[in-house]
Amino acid sequence: MGYLTVISETGFPHSACLFEYWGERHWRGFKPKAHKTPFWAGYVDTSDRSSFIKNSVKFEIIDEILERVRQDIETKYNKQFYQAALGPDCINLSVDAASLCGLKTPPPPNVSPDNLVINLARLNSNLVIKDY
């Protein structure tokens, strides 16, 4: 068994996911190519977001599902146009990852990374491994 962790970040509002399976850690987020630009060509960010975690929630998920979801997320979001609050944006990526892993997700609109973490924990309280 592996883990999906959905985070909100300190500073500029941002959401990202950590996929942990088969002893590996894979960070995935969605960002505009032009830093802090609300509407721009986007890319799948793979940088380690550990030092930026503000809030997070962690769920136990089957390894095979996590690998498939990570790949599906990369395919869907690679080369998308980033549109803050309208989507697709970083929050949409996290919601899609959670949904594809079989978790209950809050209905749109989802505009706050902090609220997303809280709502995922609340909607899936029986599946939460750890939250901070």
Image: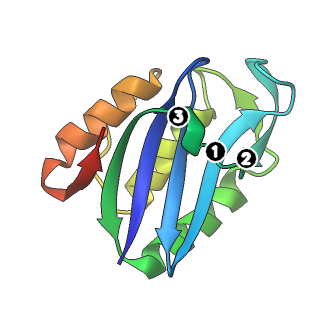
Give me the C-alpha separation between circle 1 and circle 2: 5 Å
Check the image and report above or below for 110 versus 50: above
Q: Which residue is mark 1?
A: 29
The disc label shown at residue 45, or none: 2
Give me the C-alpha separation between circle 1 and circle 3: 9 Å
Secondary-structure class at tag 2? strand
Front residue of this view, candidates 120 and 57: 57
Give the left or right position of residue 124, taking residue 49 as reference.
left
Give the left or right position of residue 16, taking residue 55 as reference.
right
Quadrant location of the N terminus in the rendered image: bottom left
**Residue 64: x percent and y percent?**
46, 81
Q: Which residue is mark 3?
A: 91
Instruction: Tell me the residue at 53%/23% (across/down).
Output: 10
Residue furthest left as drawn:
126
- In this rendering, which labeled residue sits more in front, label 3 or label 2? 2
Front residue of this view, candidates 117 and 24: 24
Secondary-structure class at tag 1? strand
Q: Quadrant of residue 101?
A: bottom left
